[in-house]
């Protein structure tokens, strides 16, 4: 094969020779840019390297004023070079000066160059610099030239990463490799975790870049692709994914991608240009990641993620790595960093070593987040770029309170968070001490503090937190973390486990509350809903699909054989829905009795008050049920017409204000009139200040997240309930709607030295 000057392959071979020669880093760089310029017949070739202070510094040039090296600078986002670095995408321009981002740096004397090709220097999706060629004429750079420059950029990235270029940096000017980074995301679970990065899918570092022989390398690539396809087929034929479901759909997509001609062609092209098979995978993956960082369409991001995962699998095939045995090498303070992951994946990490979780793509309602909350670790979500910026073992802080991540934090930041974590630990100690104290106010009023749960992993917290029982068991969580509808037996097993863990403490099971934001990937409604929160969900859905309800009732009745069973219905809008559900459960009771099953000793049916229409049929409601529990999350969302998941409006109105508090009081009063117990199990019970307001209103049983029991109990034991009740009268009374109830409650707490 005749090799043409200007081909990526020739360039790569020259680079390889240069890398093998002994040379000072600056001299080597100077030769590299000269070689690129001559190979690509360009008048200019320049390398800019990104420093930790977000400045791109000219490190080497052929063609521009040599005295501007290490002097000419652009900020990230400034000029064409800054734009490439910020967007991690190449720019190929025939007339650069007319580009809106063009900035003229007088010291470089570059105004005479029209055409411009610049590519980001990327490593694992992170931009380390920009490599540019320029020509005086209005020239169009072809695809192979873009490819050649990108491949060269990859070699330079390796020089930066392996420390070759660090010596060129002036003291105090760090390169952009290990700088502290703060990523703003969203708070998915509160708390602070300090520790070290564990990439859920550790990156494999490719150090062998240049191939010896194209054909051998193409064969290696082909063999690895073959094994990859076989391994996906194997996974697909496994029994646990053989049926329908999310898992299967993902694997089907993988299979499709593993055969994707475009992907394979790009890999082969990179090998033909002189890279090893693994370097080719890394290159294609790097381009893909860079593009992914700027993709806003969630569907497209998912597809790109699939390709990225596939790339990782292929790298493992090529480099002989099996799936990593993470547990064995896990640091004591692991903070798992991942784009997204399955709920079961998180449970594979030993709990005692997990300090936090950082996710790029998952939502607050993702299954993995639900599990993370259940095991009580701080979670920051939507932390864009975390995976590509973090390296295994990097120090990291997850600030789940603020929804932030501090990667490689500065010592003062680390010290501040360590103090915060110590403070929390001391408070936890205090809460543990409170566990054995009766749940009684300063003036002797007993208040039952129950916990909310939904998964088997929650159960140890029942004892740890000192809860009086489970006031809300969200049965839909089992459905949400499963790949298909949990079978009757699986449901019964979980319910039995819950009841056994609870011992003689009461448990209230809520029938599945799916729909709205609680989506089951394997079950979709018949049509797309404009407003799923107001749509076909919870009791509406289960009354229309009675088989679901029947199966669940039967599982509950069997699991609770020989003891009390408490069942609660979600999203009831009118009393008739309770009657219909009761008919179904009564039929199940008769069925089980006929077949001689051991039945519960008593059966209590309750309703959640979450839809405001119930506020206007309270007396009828109270006659219909054995107990009522207010779902303040939904009741508040529907009363104030503010979507609870929409950050812009979710905190616009305060539940601690007279209108909402009056609504709660009206439910309590109706309960007293009918002798029907009323409790509350929304988030409102989980904050000491709002729990205090609830107790002031007259609630004597509230259910909250397990982590809230300590702080709420600490508030309760110092609370003078009688004085508070009088204060609540002022808040609720005439003119209450114009008062700042929250401020009044704070003042009350301060005056009575109540910890909030
Ligand atoms: C509520 O709405 O307050 C409630 C407890 O139910 P969920 O948060 O599960 O909708
Ligand atoms: Mg609800």
Image (cartoon, rainbow, N blue to C red):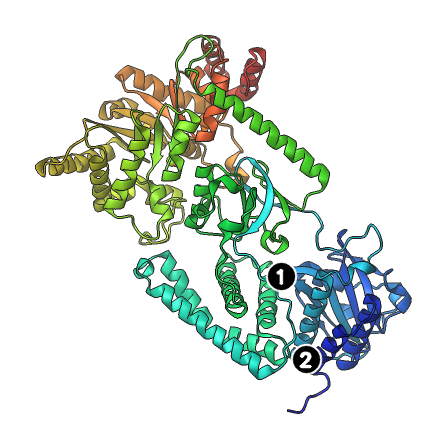
Compared with residue 74, is residue 573 higher up or lower down, i.e. above or below?
Answer: above
Q: Is residue 573 visible?
A: no
Which quadrant is the C terminus positioned in?
top right
Callout 2: CB less than 8 Å from ligand 1: no
Residue 310 percent coordinates (x, y): 49, 65
Left or right of 649: which side holds 273?
A: right
Residue 281 percent coordinates (x, y): 57, 70
Of the numbered discs in the image, which one, if any, rests on residue 658? Answer: none
Mark pair 1, 2: CA separation: 21 Å
Spot the residue most to the left: 594
Which quadrant is the N terminus positioned in?
bottom right
Q: Quadrant of ligand 2?
A: top left
Residue tagged 1: 124
- Total of numbered circles in the picture? 2
Q: Residues within 10 Å of mark 2 (few under 14, many from 20)?
A: many
Element carrying mark 2: helix
Q: Residue at x 82, y 70 (%)?
A: 23
Q: Residue at x 54, y 48 (%)?
A: 330
The mark that comes first in sequence, 1 or 2, is: 2
Element carrying mark 1: loop
Q: Which of 666/679 is in front? A: 679
Residue tagged 2: 8
Residue 648 percent coordinates (x, y): 54, 40
Q: Residue at x 50, y 77 (%)?
A: 222
Residue 70 percent coordinates (x, y): 85, 61
Q: Residues within 10 Å of mark 1 (few under 14, many from 20)?
A: many
Spot the residue most to the front: 328
């Amino acid at each position: 094969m005749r090799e043409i000057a200007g081909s990526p392959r020739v360039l790569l071979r020259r680079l390889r020779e240069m890398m093998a020669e002994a040379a000072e880093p600056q001299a080597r760089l100077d030769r590299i840019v000269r070689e690129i310029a001559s190979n690509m017949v360009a008048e200019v070739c320049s390398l800019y390297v990104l420093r930790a202070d977000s400045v791109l510094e000219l490190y080497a040039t052929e063609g521009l004023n040599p005295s501007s090296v290490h002097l000419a600078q652009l900020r990230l986002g400034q000029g064409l070079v800054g734009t490439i670095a910020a967007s991690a995408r190449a720019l190929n321009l025939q007339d650069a000066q007319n580009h809106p981002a063009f900035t003229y740096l007088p010291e470089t004397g570059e105004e005479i160059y029209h055409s411009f090709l610049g590519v980001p220097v990327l490593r694992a999706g992170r931009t380390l610099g920009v490599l540019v060629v320029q020509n005086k004429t209005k020239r169009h750079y072809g695809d192979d030239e873009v490819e050649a420059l990108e491949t060269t950029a990859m070699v330079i990235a390796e020089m930066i990463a392996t420390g070759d270029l660090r010596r060129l940096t002036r003291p105090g000017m760090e390169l952009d490799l290990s700088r502290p980074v703060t990523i703003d995301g969203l708070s998915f679970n509160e708390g602070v975790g300090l520790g070290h990065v564990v990439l859920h899918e550790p990156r494999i570092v490719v150090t062998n870049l240049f191939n010896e022989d194209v054909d051998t390398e193409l064969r290696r690539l082909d063999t690895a692709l073959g094994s990859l396809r076989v391994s996906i087929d194997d996974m697909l034929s496994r029994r646990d994914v053989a049926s329908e479901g999310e898992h299967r759909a993902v694997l089907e997509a993988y299979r499709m991608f593993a055969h994707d001609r475009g992907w394979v062609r790009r890999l082969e092209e990179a090998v033909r240009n002189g890279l090893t098979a693994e370097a080719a995978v890394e290159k294609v993956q790097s381009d893909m990641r860079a593009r992914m960082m700027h993709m806003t369409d969630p569907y497209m991001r998912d597809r790109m993620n699939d390709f990225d995962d596939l790339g990782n699998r292929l790298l493992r095939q090529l480099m002989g790595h099996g799936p990593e045995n993470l547990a064995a090498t896990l640091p004591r303070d692991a903070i798992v960093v991942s784009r997204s992951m399955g709920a079961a994946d998180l449970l594979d990490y030993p709990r005692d070593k997990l300090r936090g979780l950082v996710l790029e793509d998952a939502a607050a309602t993702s299954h993995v987040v639900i599990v993370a909350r259940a095991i009580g670790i701080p979670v920051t979500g939507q932390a864009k770029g975390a995976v590509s910026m973090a390296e295994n073992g990097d120090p990291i802080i997850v600030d789940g309170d603020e929804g932030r991540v501090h990667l490689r934090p500065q010592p003062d930041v680390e010290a501040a968070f360590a103090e915060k974590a110590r403070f929390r630990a001391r408070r936890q100690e205090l809460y543990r001490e409170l566990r054995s104290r009766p749940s009684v106010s300063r003036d002797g009023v007993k208040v039952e503090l129950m916990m909310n749960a939904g998964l088997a992993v929650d159960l140890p917290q029942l004892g740890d937190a000192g809860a009086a029982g489970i006031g809300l068991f969200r049965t839909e969580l089992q459905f949400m973390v499963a790949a298909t509808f949990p079978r009757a037996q699986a449901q019964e097993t979980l319910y039995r486990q819950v009841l056994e863990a609870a011992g003689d403490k009461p448990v209230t099971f809520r029938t599945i509350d799916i729909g709205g934001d609680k989506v089951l990937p394997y079950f979709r409604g018949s049509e797309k809903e404009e407003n799923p929160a107001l749509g076909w969900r919870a009791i509406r859905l289960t009354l229309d699909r009675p088989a679901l309800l029947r199966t669940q009732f039967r599982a509950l009745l069997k699991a609770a054989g020989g003891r009390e069973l408490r069942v609660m219905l979600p999203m009831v809008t009118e009393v008739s829905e309770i009657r219909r559900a009761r008919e179904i459960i009564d039929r199940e009771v008769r069925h089980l009795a006929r077949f001689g099953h051991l039945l519960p000793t008593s059966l209590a049916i309750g309703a959640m008050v979450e839809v405001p229409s119930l506020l206007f049929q309270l007396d009828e409601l109270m006659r219909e049920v054995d107990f009522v529990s207010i779902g303040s999350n939904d009741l508040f969302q529907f009363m104030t017409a503010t979507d609870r998941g929409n950050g812009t409006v979710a905190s616009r109105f305060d539940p601690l204000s007279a209108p909402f508090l009056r609504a709660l009081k009206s439910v309590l009063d109706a309960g007293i009139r009918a002798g029907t117990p009323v409790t509350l199990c929304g988030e409102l019970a989980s904050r000491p200040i709002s729990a205090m307001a609830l107790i002031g209103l007259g609630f004597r049983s509230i259910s909250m997240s397990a982590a809230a029991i300590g702080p709420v109990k600490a508030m309760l034991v110092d609370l003078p309930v009688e004085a508070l009740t009088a204060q609540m009268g002022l808040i609720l009374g005439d003119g209450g709607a114009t008062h700042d109830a929250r401020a009044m409650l704070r003042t009350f707490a301060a005056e009575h030295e109540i910890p909030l």
